[in-house]
């Protein structure tokens, strides 16, 4: 399986997800500013991977900071990383975790603090892989044998420290001997499905076919799709789910056709401070992502564009939310807080 992000002596090394699948190139970040840039430009993307990258970015910042100005610099490090992408709550969860450790170590020697920050960032990484494997174990029994699984965007190893959330469920189902294949929505405009999900599943020899986003309804009606599994960037207390734009349409089509629609996400993707999904901030991305494909214009010059990177699927379309602690079922305002506390 691909290594998405790694802490090395030379810096944090990440496979460049803006260049896949044509080019397998690695980017090394040695400063928190470089890491913030990598998150913003989507060299690394996917909610849990962004969380790991932010934790490592904070650790890089503390390693390089002037010990005499540390408290002031720490604030800037955290706020710079927090300003990269607004929707995935894992980013803020990881920064808060690093902040708590920093605060708990006030007064300790700088060397001890630096060591602890690096250790914590590596722990966020290691825990994420274990969490995804647990998500896979809970989700695999839900995947119907002998059918196709439809997924949207990339919620795979590339979107996490490893194994993946939605693709983790698929991997676990395959490992359990289920005879399944995958349909990957191409996921306009950034093409995470076409570029990343197809590439990642091919690496693991999991049968995958690419479809365009507007084919989802056709196949959901056909009886061929056993279930839909997607990831999430933020889940409100009532089970409304923000995920890559286009997810909402797939969820409505799944319900219309009686196909179960599952969301696979770690507990760190829950935002229990939000009552419902309308409160989730939706990132607006540059218009060129819509007007151009790989730098080639596909729309007239000066075309006005809307480019929300995420949409919110209301909880009534969500059959279950698969977490590392088990599967939450409706009513989510009861099941999610209970699961989070376990
Ligand atoms: C396990 S990743 C879950 C989500 O982050 C994923 O489905 C998604 O929407 C990613 O969006 P992206 O804009 O590529 O970061």
Image (tube, grey):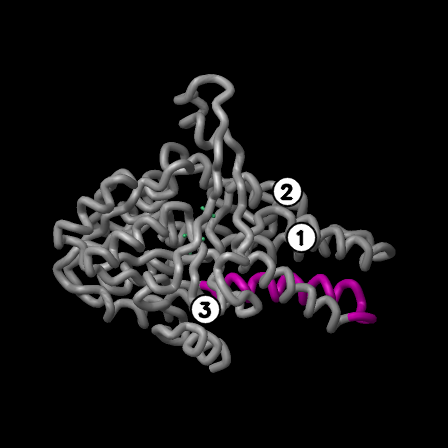
Residue 239 at x, y = what percent? 42, 66
* Magenta residue span: 106-128
Q: Main secondary structure of the magenta part?
A: helix
Q: Is residue 122 magenta?
A: yes
Horizontal relation, residue 174 to residue 320: left or right: left
Viewer-side residue, 128 vs 231: 231
Q: Nearer the viewer, mark 3 or mark 1?
A: 3
User: What is the spatial separation of the Cα atoms under label 3 and label 1, in whole angstroms?
Assistant: 36 Å
2 or 3: tag closer to the N-terminus: 2
Q: Is residue 255 above or below residue 202?
A: below
Residue assigned mark 3: 238
User: What is the spatial separation of the Cα atoms under label 2 and label 1, in whole angstroms?
Assistant: 10 Å
Q: Assign a secondary structure to mark 2.
A: helix
Horizontal relation, residue 302 to residue 108: left or right: left
Q: Assign a secondary structure to mark 3.
A: loop
Viewer-side residue, 156 vs 273: 273
Q: Nearer the viewer, mark 2 or mark 1?
A: 2
Q: Assign a secondary structure to mark 1.
A: helix
Residue assigned mark 1: 60
Horizontal relation, residue 34 to residue 342: left or right: right
Horizontal relation, residue 65 to residue 239: left or right: right
Residue 321 at x, y = what percent? 37, 67
The quadrant holding residue 238 is bottom left
User: What is the spatial separation of the Cα atoms under label 2 and label 3, in whole angstroms?
Assistant: 36 Å
Residue assigned mark 2: 34
3 or 1: tag closer to the N-terminus: 1
Looking at the rendered structure, which numbered label has been put on residue 14?
none
2 or 1: tag closer to the N-terminus: 2
Tell me whether circle 2 and circle 1 mark residues in contact (CB < 8 Å): yes
Tell me whether circle 2 and circle 3 mark residues in contact (CB < 8 Å): no
Q: Nearer the viewer, mark 2 or mark 3?
A: 3
Residue at left 52%, top 67%?
275
């Amino acid at each position: 399986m691909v290594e998405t992000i790694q802490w090395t002596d030379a810096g944090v090394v990440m496979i460049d997800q803006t260049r896949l699948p044509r080019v397998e190139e690695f980017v090394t970040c040695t400063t928190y500013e470089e890491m913030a840039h990598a998150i913003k430009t989507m060299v690394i993307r996917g909610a849990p991977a962004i969380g790991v990258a932010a934790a490592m970015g904070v650790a890089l910042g503390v390693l390089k900071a002037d010990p005499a100005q540390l408290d002031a610099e720490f604030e800037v490090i955290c706020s710079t990383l927090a300003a990269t992408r607004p929707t995935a709550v894992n980013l803020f969860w990881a920064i808060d975790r690093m902040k708590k450790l920093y605060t708990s170590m006030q007064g300790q020697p700088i060397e001890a603090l630096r060591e602890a920050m690096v250790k914590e960032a590596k722990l966020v990484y290691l825990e994420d892989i274990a969490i995804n494997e647990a998500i896979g174990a809970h989700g695999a029994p839900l995947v119907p044998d002998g059918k196709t699984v439809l997924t949207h965007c990339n919620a795979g190893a590339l979107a996490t420290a490893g194994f993946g959330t939605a693709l983790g469920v698929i991997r676990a189902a395959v490992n359990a001997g289920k005879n399944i294949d995958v349909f990957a929505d191409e996921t306009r405009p950034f093409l995470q499905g076409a570029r990343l999900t197809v590439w990642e599943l091919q690496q693991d020899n999991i049968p995958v076919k690419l479809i365009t986003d507007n084919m989802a309804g056709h196949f959901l009606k056909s009886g061929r799709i056993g279930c839909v599994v997607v990831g999430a960037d933020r889940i409100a207390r009532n089970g409304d789910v923000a995920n890559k734009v286009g997810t909402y349409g797939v969820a409505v089509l799944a319900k219309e056709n009686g196909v179960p629609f599952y969301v696979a996400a770690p507990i760190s993707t829950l935002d229990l401070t939000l009552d419902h999904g309308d409160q989730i901030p939706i990132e607006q991305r540059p218009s060129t992502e819509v007007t151009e494909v790989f730098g080639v214009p596909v729309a007239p010059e000066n075309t006005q564009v809307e480019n929300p990177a995420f949409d919110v699927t209301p909880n009534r379309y969500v059959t279950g939310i698969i977490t590392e602690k088990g599967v939450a079922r409706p009513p989510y305002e009861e099941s999610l807080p209970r699961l989070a506390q376990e």
